């Protein structure tokens, strides 16, 4: 029978070593690049539409970044980016779009209702539910605070 110390030693020897510096650098660079693209999109929108308010520019920037995340997921680029960058590709807007589009594409063969509609929020559903519940709790707390 193997005791805990021997097992830890065995796992330490046989487990693959993680290239932590490379993973952190890739996540930082890709996440920063996605954020820079978002900032550039916002800047272009504000130049093209100078009378648009800052809130509207932010809303349109969000829409464009969701489109980019969905489009690059659909053509298979975002998955490769996620494999390279790890957590750096989970920037909230584009990562959320990826988490909705990926299951929709995967279950497309099962039809519109039982495939796309039923499975589209498999990954993103818990995030949406948590966000709504947390928003309600914060709203109730701020109502009585």
Image: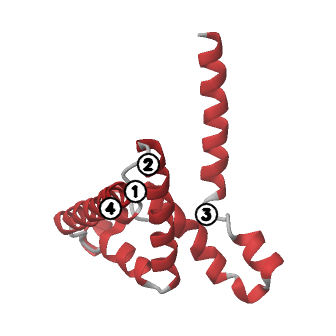
Taking the view exactly as shown, the residue that stands out farthest to the bottom is 109
Give residue 37's position: percent from left, percent from top: 31, 64
Q: In front of the other: label 3 or label 2?
A: 2
- Whichever of callouts 4 and 2 sits on the residue coming sooner in the sequence is 4
**Callout 2 touching callout 1 (CB < 8 Å):** yes
- Provide the residue designation for mark 3: 123
Give residue 45's position: percent from left, percent from top: 38, 59
Which secondary structure lies at badge 4? helix
Q: 71 or 58, which lies in front?
A: 58
Give residue 32's position: percent from left, percent from top: 26, 59
- Provide the residue designation for mark 2: 52
Q: Quarter of the image containing the N terminus?
A: bottom left
Q: In front of the other: label 1 or label 4?
A: 1
Marks 2 and 1, Cα distance to the nearest angstrom? 6 Å
- Provide the residue designation for mark 4: 44
- Whichever of callouts 3 and 2 sits on the residue coming sooner in the sequence is 2
Marks 3 and 2, Cα distance to the nearest angstrom? 34 Å
* Residue at image location 32% in from the left, 61% down from the top: 44
Residue 87 in sight in this render: yes
- Provide the residue designation for mark 1: 49
């Amino acid at each position: 029978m193997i005791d805990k110390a021997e097992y830890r030693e065995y796992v330490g020897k046989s487990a693959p070593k993680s290239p932590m510096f490379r993973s952190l650098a890739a996540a930082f660079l890709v996440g920063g690049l996605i954020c820079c693209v978002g900032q550039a999109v916002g800047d272009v929108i504000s130049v093209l539409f100078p009378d648009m308010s800052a809130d509207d520019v932010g809303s349109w920037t969000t829409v464009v970044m969701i489109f980019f995340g969905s489009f690059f997921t659909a053509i298979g680029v975002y998955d490769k980016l996620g494999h390279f960058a790890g957590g750096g590709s989970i920037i909230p807007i584009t990562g959320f779009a990826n988490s909705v589009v990926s299951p929709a594409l995967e279950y497309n063969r099962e039809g519109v209702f039982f495939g796309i509609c039923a499975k589209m929020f498999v990954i993103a559903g818990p995030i949406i539910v948590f966000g709504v519940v947390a928003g309600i709790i914060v709203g109730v707390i701020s109502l009585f605070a």
